[in-house]
């Protein structure tokens, strides 16, 4: 039985003794990733858009885009490249750990050749198993690395929000995640077995990993979790020590704060990258130790003179990167000294303490200070507008019924409930009257169910004109054609399109775009600003996301937490210390 202390000491010893090798390997991996994988992916995607004739991909056209023969072939090619990249990256680390723990001398060329011998597996049915294996490990990584490498590997929030809105959905979600974690845990040693054993197949590696589950698996998971915990504690300690000079200088010598902040951020970026790389190496060492029951510490065959000679060019490269990062950070931080004017938009009113899309939620959102209040409307069977999100009454009333088949009068008699609170369904007229009394503007989302009257848009415009809010309100919908028609009917009305998914540049004739946060990129933000199209990002309910998009000064953030968003916006102004900006940036990066 392995002891945690012995395993950790062995891992630390080997990484220290072979530190020059690890620096070179990680440098090569990063260069390969940023100089080949990332640019190649962008080129292939642009080529797919050009060949298929699409300007950008949304939930409306993604199905036809994905079935195009050229797109299918390019996606397969990209998946193969990504799988190969993961294979070589992790294969190098596992083979290095395997040789180091046995005191066997190795060269990078030898490791490369050994990995090449198994590349044929990616051109057989085994590649499907390999892909499924990586997908199954994702939930486990989300548990082990909640704040680090998997922060961008998640299901879009609009999907999880819908799943988690009901008890049965939450139960199903929990069951699926638990099953995936169990399967992932039992398969965790597949990769070290496959990469280090020359003649074993991926399927055979999978069988061996599952057999390992009968011995030592819980101890392995415990050590991996301990590694993550220690890693986070070290990060916090280094962050505190590294930012202490900036904290002092900002208060005693404000004129030096900008340069100091740029240098501090560059230092922390390099340190964190090294720490994450070391965490990968530690994981490889521990997993190889458990896989092959390594009994003793490996011995280094490197002489001190050899190691010193290999460090000189690396030190120079690190110094150059540090200087370049410092200069870039100073320029970036200097540009960030401004007060963001991002609109805080309350999603379906203020749902904390209220039921969504109700007058009480509207009043609470206005009291909280939201700049806009988003509400969902649908047309009833008698041609009126009711404020309600779902097509069905089931979720909020517990009764059967479809909005499109009921009159406004029938709907207003119903009681809706959520999270222990009750309220009544209201009409759009009720909302506008209260909003005018509170002096707040609405972002009206028109939910299209397919049974609208032919004059649904003229009716909506007439109503907004009657209340004299046409120039103040915003109207959006997931139906681009209807919004184009609405813009022609009412040029002064701010009209937008809601997208749950978008890939690629957008070229629209509306005033704003509402886009789910997972698909918002810096390039898209820049392109929309050039086109003078506003961007609203939804639905942001994590402080990290709110910090990020308010810092980027998008035109609006749609959130269930308008009070927190307002506090964050208030802090991100010209009086905020550079130290706070750096901590926010590090949170976004890592």
Image (cartoon, grey):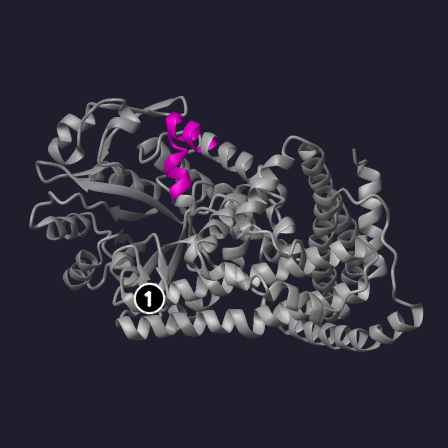
Q: Where's residue 154, x and y in %?
A: 49, 47
Q: Is residue 431 left or right of residue 107?
A: left
Q: Where's residue 399, x and y in %?
A: 23, 22
* Image quadrant containing the C terminus: bottom right
Q: Nearer the viewer, residue 309 or 253?
A: 309
Q: Secondary structure at mark 1?
A: helix
Q: Main secondary structure of the magenta part?
A: helix
Q: Residue at x 65, y 68 (%)?
A: 113
**Quarter where residue 25 is shown:** bottom right
Q: Residue at x 28, y 62 (%)?
A: 65
**Quarter where residue 258 is shown:** bottom right
166 in magenta: yes
From the viewer's perspective, is residue 543 above or below residue 72?
above
564 in magenta: no
Q: Residue at x 45, y 58 (%)?
A: 124
From the viewer's perspective, is residue 348 above or below residue 252?
above
Q: How many marks?
A: 1
Q: Is residue 161 left or right of residue 113?
A: left
The region drawn magenta spans: 159-174
Can see residue 334? no
**Quarter where residue 247 is shown:** bottom right
Q: Nearer the viewer, residue 590 or 377?
A: 590
* Image quadrant containing the N terminus: top right
Task: Specify the farthest residue to the right.
Answer: 304
Task: Specify the farthest residue to the front.
Answer: 199
Can see residue 416? yes
Instruction: Tell me if mark 1 has few (under 14), some (14-19) or many (20+) residues whose alpha carbon lies within 10 angstroms of its own.
Output: some
Look at mark 1 in the image and give the residue it sits on.
71
Q: Nearer the viewer, residue 587 or 105?
A: 105
Q: Is residue 75 left or right of residue 286?
A: left
Q: Is residue 379 left or right of residue 375?
A: left
């Amino acid at each position: 039985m392995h002891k945690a202390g012995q395993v950790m000491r062995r891992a630390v010893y080997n990484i220290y003794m072979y530190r020059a090798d690890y620096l070179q390997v990680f440098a090569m991996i990063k260069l390969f990733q940023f100089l080949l994988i990332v640019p190649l992916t962008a080129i292939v995607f642009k080529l797919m858009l050009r060949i298929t004739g699409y300007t950008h991909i949304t939930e409306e056209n993604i199905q036809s885009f994905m079935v195009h023969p050229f797109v299918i072939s390019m996606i397969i090619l990209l998946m193969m490249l990504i799988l190969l990249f993961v294979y070589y990256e992790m294969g190098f680390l596992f083979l290095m750990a395997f040789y180091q723990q046995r005191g066997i001398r190795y060269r990078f060329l030898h490791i490369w050749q050994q990995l090449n011998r198994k590349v044929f597996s990616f051109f057989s049915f085994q590649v499907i198993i390999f892909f499924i294996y990586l997908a199954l490990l994702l939930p486990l990584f989300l548990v082990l690395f909640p704040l680090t490498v998997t922060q961008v590997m998640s299901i879009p929030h609009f999907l999880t929000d819908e799943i988690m809105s009901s008890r049965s959905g939450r139960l199903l979600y929990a069951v699926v995640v638990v099953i995936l974690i169990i399967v992932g845990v039992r398969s965790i040693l597949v990769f070290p077995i496959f990469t280090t054993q020359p003649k074993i197949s991926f399927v055979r590696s999978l069988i061996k990993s599952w057999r390992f589950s009968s011995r030592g698996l819980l101890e392995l998971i415990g050590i991996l979790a301990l590694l993550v915990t220690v890693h986070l504690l070290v990060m916090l300690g280094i962050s505190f020590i590294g930012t202490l000079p900036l904290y002092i200088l900002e208060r005693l010598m404000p004129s030096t704060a900008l340069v100091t902040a740029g240098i501090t951020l560059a230092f922390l970026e390099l340190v964190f990258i090294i720490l994450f790389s070391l965490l990968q190496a530690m994981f490889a060492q521990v997993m190889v130790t458990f896989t092959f029951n390594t009994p003793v510490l490996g011995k280094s065959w490197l002489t001190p003179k050899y190691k010193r000679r290999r460090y000189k060019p690396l030190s120079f490269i690190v110094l150059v990167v540090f200087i370049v990062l410092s200069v870039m950070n100073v320029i970036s931080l200097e540009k960030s000294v401004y007060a963001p004017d991002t609109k805080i938009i309350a999603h379906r009113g203020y749902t904390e303490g209220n039921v969504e899309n109700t007058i009480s939620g509207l009043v609470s959102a206005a009291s909280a200070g939201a700049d806009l209040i988003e509400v969902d409307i649908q047309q009833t069977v008698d041609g009126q507008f009711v404020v309600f999100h779902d097509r069905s009454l089931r979720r909020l009333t517990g009764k059967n019924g479809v909005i499109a088949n009921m009159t406004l009068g029938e709907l207003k008699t119903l009681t809706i409930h959520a999270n222990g609170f009750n309220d009544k369904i209201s009409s759009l007229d009720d909302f506008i009257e209260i909003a005018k009394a509170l002096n707040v503007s609405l972002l009206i989302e028109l939910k299209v169910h397919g049974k609208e009257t032919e004059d649904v848009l003229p009716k909506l415009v007439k109503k907004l004109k009657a209340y004299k809010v046409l120039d103040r309100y915003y109207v959006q919908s997931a139906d681009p054609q209807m919004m184009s028609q609405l813009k022609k009917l009412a040029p002064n009305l701010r009209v937008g399109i809601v997208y749950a998914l978008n890939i690629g540049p957008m070229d629209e004739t509306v005033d704003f775009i509402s886009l789910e946060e997972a698909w918002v990129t810096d390039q898209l933000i820049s392109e929309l600003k050039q086109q003078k199209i506003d961007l609203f990002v939804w639905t942001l309910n994590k402080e990290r996301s709110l910090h990020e998009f308010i810092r980027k000064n998008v035109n609006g953030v749609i959130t269930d937490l308008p009070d927190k968003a307002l506090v964050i916006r208030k802090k991100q102004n010209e009086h905020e210390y550079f130290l706070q900006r750096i901590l926010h940036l590090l949170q976004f990066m890592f």
